[in-house]
Image (spheres, grey):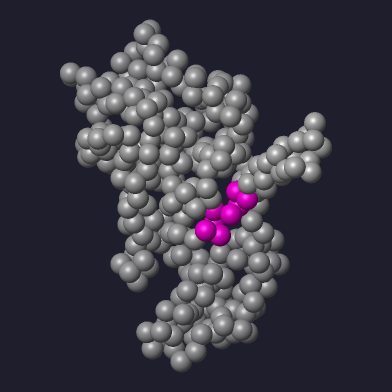
Amino acid sequence: MMAVERGAAQNTLDAYRRDLEDAGHHFLGRGTSLRDADTDAIRGYVAALAAEGLAESSRARRLSALRQFYRFLYVEGHRGDDPTGPIEGAKKKRPLPKVMSEEEVDRLLDLAAAEAATDRLSSSARLRAARLHALVELLYATGLRVSELVALPRSVLRATGQAIVVKGKGGKERMVPIGEAAGDAMRRYADVAGEPGRKLEGNGRFLFPAASETGHLTRQAFARDLKALAARAGITAAKISPHVLRHAFASHLLKHGADLRAVQELLGHSDISTTQIYTHVLEERLIRLVTDHHPLSPLSRD
């Protein structure tokens, strides 16, 4: 159901499987099964996770997996009740996202561009530099999820104008503007990758092919290269990840006047509440707007 009806990604399916298997092992050790566990058994499982020192966010995720599992059993008629109904989960505290400054992003992009333009590189090093430049430019220009970025099809090179179609969670497609700089970096990388005599590993239908299980560059490989680039740019590696650049895209857009709904659409969030983690940026902007322009503001009176 998760795969076919909801179009869940493989990473999501794997996470649900791990969470349900862990709960199943717990229940078996206490004389029941995953299918037959009652409310008390599930409360005991959640309490055991807390006693083990599991983070609140991880406990909430595991309880969420159980809720969806038992709801499915109930709806499909495999159980006459949903034992998770009476259980209240701890509300997850949504932390503020880590955000890079615009100056830091500029340093990162400038270095990636400079390294990609270096003449004194071996053929393979030139390809890696061009690929990293394209990845970083595209990520900051679009705010794509890293899983969407590394799996971009080669067909995006045929896109006319300054926008591409991206397939996101649940197979939903959305149009994403990429901007001139990112488009140029993407095409320059494609030119380097398509040089005569160069043989690329992986699946040729991907923009960033690699010798991996999926046939395209892995998220982990890109994250590693991004951290190394940040270190060379004088930015603390611990401060950056592909997801941090996605946050920077959204925060910087809002800072410069973008509408929250527009940012929601660009990020591919199905629910506006997910996008509202960026309201701290909006609040700062609105306070500045009132301070600078309200007739009763001291600045306006001056």
Q: Residue at x 44, y 51 (%)?
A: 265
Residue 213 placement (x, y as % from top left) = 31, 45
The one nearer the camera, 39 or 41, is 39
Q: Residue at x 43, y 30 (%)?
A: 137
Q: Residue at x 53, y 30 (%)?
A: 227
Is residue 90 at all visible to an observer of this figure?
yes
Residue 99 drawn in magenta: no
Q: Which residues are magenta?
A: 272-279
Among all residues in the image, which is located at the extreme bottom? 80
60 vs 287, left or right, is left
The one nearer the camera, 173 or 128, is 173
Quarter occupied by residue 193: top left
- The quadrant of the image that shows the C terminus is top right
Quarter occupied by residue 207: top left
Magenta stretch, main secondary structure class: helix
Quarter occupied by residue 159: top left
Residue 215 placement (x, y as % from top left) = 28, 41
Q: Residue at x 38, y 35 (%)?
A: 178
148 vs 39, left or right, is left
Residue 199 placement (x, y as % from top left) = 21, 26
37 vs 166, left or right, is right
User: Is residue 65 shown above or below 274?
Assistant: below
Is residue 250 at all visible to an observer of this figure?
no
